[in-house]
Amino acid sequence: MSSTYQVFTTGTEYTSSHRVYIEHNGQVISPFHDIPLYADSEKKIVNMIVEIPRWSNAKYEIATGEKYNPIKQDVKKGKVRFVRNCFPYKGYIWNYGALPQTWEDPTVISKDTNARGDNDPIDVCEIGQEIGYRGQIKQVKILGVMALLDEGETDWKLIAIDINDPLADKVNDIQDVEKYFPQLIDATRHWFKIYKMPDGKPANQFAFNGQCKDKTYAEAVVKETHEAWKRLIEGRTPCKADTHNISMANFTNKHSPYVLNTFNDKELQKALVKQTNKKDIEGKDNKWYFLKSQL
């Protein structure tokens, strides 16, 4: 499925003007609203939008408030945002992104975390060996989930693996991650705890004492956030409120009051440049090696 989507950009990378747009069948779409959540609903294979490739630092995210919801770099105090390298990590330690057609509703308090949603599509940490690219649509299976409490909001962090990864057939639940990716769950928890500290912020807190919940629990969270998105796209939840301001323009949700018939933004279409992704260097090994050894 990923090959049916193409990635285009406007503006200059690492500036506040840079935007990453997704096209499908030659037309700009909303990755938030138009890419289906499930690539295979029976097998519970979901689509993931890569926002930040592994080992990179630029903090990119879906612009939920902009028309067509392009991916943009986060801006704080007028400057584009980069996460720091917190020893022993380099940038993000997984391919990081979001699931389309999901929404962490800021008007609802979770009974499990006692905190409101963070007003974003649900986040995903994809642990496979391939380094993704910004705007890539991966098909992944969900393995588990952590609940970060980020500045008082529930910020779910799904753990998933690309279905094309060499280990995908062996890794089916969260306990398999510890078997085939030893210490990655602990490293993930530690990374999320400390990653804002170099900027003067306190350590992040977690629900469930930092426990990573299993596949069944995670899939229930995905379903819950998908239902929240459905209420939003169908107009049952207002798209503008004190807690949020979401751009709902879409082309595929026929029962949505916000659906558009055609894409007719000629200025944007003219400005789009096809994204060129870096080719792998022959002999360069981008694989993580998880070694069980006593030093």
Image (cartoon, grey):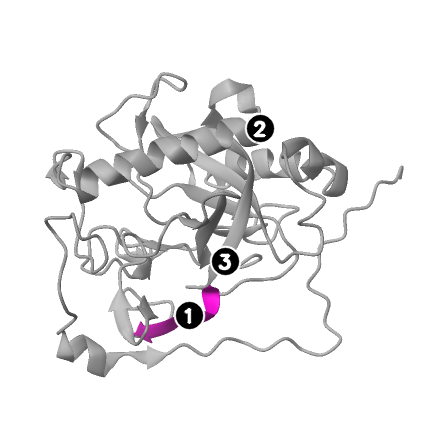
Q: Residue furthest bottom?
A: 270
Amino acid on which disc 2 is placed: Asp
**Residue occupied by mark 2:** 214
Question: Quick one: label 2, few (<14), some, or many (20+) residues within 10 Å?
Answer: some
- Direction front: furthest residue: 42
Left or right? Give the position of 171 relative to 125: right
The x and y percentages for residue 6 are: 39, 72
Residue stretch rendered in magenta on the structure: 1-10
Q: State how far apart marks 3 and 2 are (Cα).
A: 21 Å
- Side of 59 relative to 65 (left or right): right
Residue occupying image coordinates x 89% and y 37%: 294
Predominant SS along the magenta part = strand
Marker disc for residue 138: 3
The answer to whether the residues at label 3 and label 2 have Cβ atoms under 8 Å apart is no
Q: Which residue is mark 1?
A: 4
Q: Secondary structure at mark 1?
A: helix
Q: Percent position (x, y) of residue 190?
A: 59, 35
